[in-house]
Image (tube, grey):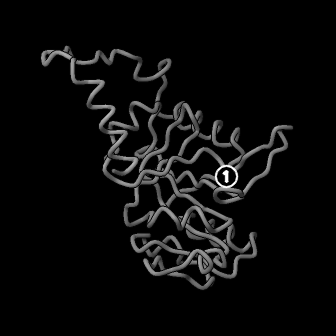
Amino acid sequence: MSSRERILGRVRRALADLPDDEPPITRDYLREHGRRGVAETVELLAENLADYRAVVHRTDGDGLAGLIAALLRGRGSASVLVPPGIPPGWLAATGVPRVADRAESTPQELDRVDSVVTGCAVAVAETGTIVLDGSPDQGRRRITLVPDHHICVVRVPGQVVSSVPQALGRLDPARPLTWISGPSATSDIELDRVEGVHGPRTLEVVLLSGS
């Protein structure tokens, strides 16, 4: 018997004496804290992203390609990983060699990639969190966990919500969800912060207006 089977067996035994007509769980918690308009929600997202040490940029559709090119150039990136569903125009202004998101890529190959550019599924203003769900413009989960530099484009205001409950309402729990609050970081018992341990050392979030 596997560990999984043992755990599930214990759960079933613990639930065996519950009545069949158990009332449903009441979910009457707040859907968001306070009342904010669209512009205020986006500002809160930018503020909390920055508080988590993400670097926040703003642009519109006309400036996006130039901004991404400048970010890659400023990073000195010699390669950029691109999910299959990224709109072609996003990288139209950069000459950086592109690496495709391939199932057979090894961790060592991904570690040699300098940057990755993705979209997102939703962004949560109250927590400063970006959520990826493996859609074509985001690619496999590992491509945003191994390279050291992640540029994530958030369509504003369409992909921005106030709270986690609102985000959950938009997400499919069967998809591979990755919740990102700032660059990867950890700290030891003396609270010395180290970045880039479990994911990118640098997270740059582009708020793309008019989307």
Based on the displayed image, in which of its 4 quarters is residue 30 positioned? top left
Q: Is residue 153 above or below residue 34?
A: below
Q: Which x, y percent locates residue 47? A: 65, 36
> Looking at the image, how many numbered discs can be counted on the residues?
1
Q: Extreme front residue here?
A: 1
Residue pointed to by mark 1: 184
Element at label 1:
loop
**Residue at 56% of width from left, 34% of height from top?**
127
Q: Nearer the viewer, residue 7 or 73?
A: 7
Q: Which x, y percent locates residue 175? A: 34, 53
For residue 6, side relative to residue 108 (left or right): left
Based on the displayed image, in which of its 4 quarters is residue 128 positioned? top right
For residue 204, side relative to residue 24 (left or right): right
Q: Is residue 74 above or below residue 18?
A: below
For residue 107, side relative to residue 33 (left or right): right
Q: Which x, y percent locates residue 197? A: 70, 56
**Residue at 45% of width from left, 79% of height from top?**
102
Q: Is residue 63 above or below residue 195?
A: below
- Residue type beneath disc 1: Ser
Q: Nearer the viewer, residue 118 or 177?
A: 177
**Residue at 58% of width from left, 55% of height from top?**
206
Q: Is residue 56 above or below residue 106?
A: above
**Residue at 66% of width from left, 79% of height from top?**
112
For residue 73, side relative to residue 82 (left or right): right
Q: Which x, y percent locates residue 15? A: 26, 24
